[in-house]
Image: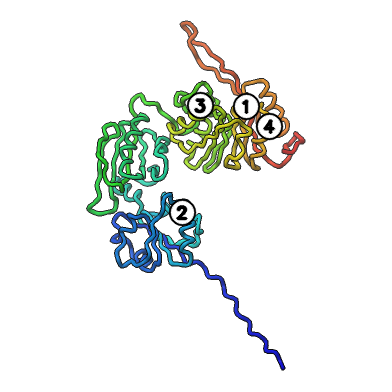
Amino acid sequence: MTTPTPTPIPRQAPQAEPPLTVVGVGADGWAGLAGPAREALLAAEVVIGAPRQLGLLPPEVAAERVQWPSPLRPAVPGLLAAHAGRAVAVLASGDPFHHGIGRALAETAGAGRLRVLPHPSSVAYACARLGWPQEDTEVVSAVGRPLERVAAALHDGRRLLVLSADAATPAAVAALLRERGYGPSELHVLERLGDGGRERRLSGTAQTWDEAQGDPLNLVAVVCRRAPGAQRLGAVPGLPDTAYEHDGQLTKRPVRAATLAALAPAPGELLWDVGGGSGSIGIEWMRTHPACRAVAVERDPVRAERIGRNARALGVPGLAVATGAAPAALAGLPGPPDAVFVGGGLTAPGLLDACWDALPEGGRLVANTVTLESEALLARWYGRHGGELVRLAVASAVPVGGFTGWRQAMPVTQWSVTKTSTTHPGKGVTS
């Protein structure tokens, strides 16, 4: 008897996840949505959004309505996983990729899975109402972020748009401007942008602002005006020493500017500022670009708290502070760093070795010292790894009786080097 040959069962191709539709919605809700956005919401099995956004949908959107939990960002992977295989639409405020949920969704689900139907952003509406070119207007978000970030954008005549967290944000912006010496700045609070006849605009100055809280859906427009006598802070490294609260442990202005030039910050890079002192190097690193990150390592708890105050005052509240002595305190820091600055404690056993080992290829190390012992150490490392060894000498004019003379500051020896895997020409030593 012949045994029949079994018929092979065709292997099923894995089912691809359906597209994740992201719909931008404005203050005018359903009425302001274009046809494709309405069709996507009507076809969805699940709609995820904030309570206010979900409340804008009409009854004919029959999908299950799911509110974002708080905090939102950590909940995104689990919420998407819970509705895997279903047609999901996510509601976003205006343009999902302008300070919106779009980034978190792209990082979690992958940009290729997203179908994005944007709506005009509040920034687009604000610039249209004010007649401001978007390319000349700086945007700072206070939604889920410290308001102190506004301080880094304050320059006389500059136009800012602050994305508000709630109805209390306008008064908080006005108070910050007064504290930073920008009380004369013009303020325009634009409420319910894009909502037709419900739009409202309140105007005044930060110095005199006393408006009661209005609609939580608002944006604050600022025309920066520096008060007479208020300190001017430039956009490049080398802020005045008087901009910092310090106890004498401060890299002075000329040396600080030279140090930042040697560190050469670029957008998105991470700095370890070892021996933070007053935090000036990490602070000015972060002020070069909003995407720059830094960690200040300081063993003295009093100075560590002072670093945090300076960072908030100068508009970079995201500066992280690790309290502890290096090199032990370097363990567990975010990394790898793109650059390391050593401003103190060079002779601590293993410190330079730990900093060097933490750097990837192409990373930069800059170290400053004023002592002969640390200078000798830097000379040895320069002999092994190359780079640039310079002495910075600064003298300031001071009164001498009825005349003026030079007062010489202690010279600073600075070693800067880029880590490579190649042999340094003429040194015969491999990094």
Pointers 1 and 2 in contact (C-beta within 8 Å):
no
* Residue type at numbered disc 4: Gly
Q: Please, what is the three-letter code of the amino acid marked with disc 3?
A: Val
Q: Earlier in the sequence, mark 4 or mark 3?
A: 3
Q: Callout 2: few (<14), some (14-19), or many (20+) C-alpha neighbours within 10 Å?
A: few
State the separation of the CA atoms marked 4 and 2. 41 Å
Q: Is residue 136 visible?
A: no
Look at discs 1 and 2 and give the one toward the viewer. Answer: 2
Secondary structure under the numbered disc 2 in the rendered image: helix
Work out whether residue 308 can be spotted. Answer: yes
Q: Which residue is mark 4?
A: 350
Which corner quadrant of the image does residue 356 belong to? top right
Q: Quadrant of residue 231?
A: top left
Do the residues under discs 4 and 2 have CB atoms within 8 angstroms? no
The amino acid type of the residue labelled 2 equals Ala
User: Which disc number belongs to residue 302?
Assistant: 3
Q: Residue furthest bottom?
A: 1
First in residue order: circle 1 vs circle 3: 3
The residue tagged 2 is 75
**Residue at 46% from the left image edge and 54% from the top image edge:** 75
Q: Residues within 10 Å of mark 1 (few under 14, many from 20)?
A: some
The amino acid pointed to by label 1 is: Gly
**Label 1 to label 4, Cα distance in Å?**
10 Å
Whether label 1 touches label 3, CB < 8 Å: no
Counting from the top left corner in percent of width and height, residue 18 is at 47, 67
Say which label, 3 or 2, has the lower sequence index.
2
Image depth: mark 4 or mark 3 in front: 3
Residue 363, compared with residue 74, is above or below; it is above
Element marked by disc 3: helix
Q: Callout 4: few (<14), some (14-19), or many (20+) C-alpha neighbours within 10 Å?
A: few
Q: Is residue 351 left or right of residue 282?
A: right
| Rendering coords of residue 416 (x, y %) | 63, 32
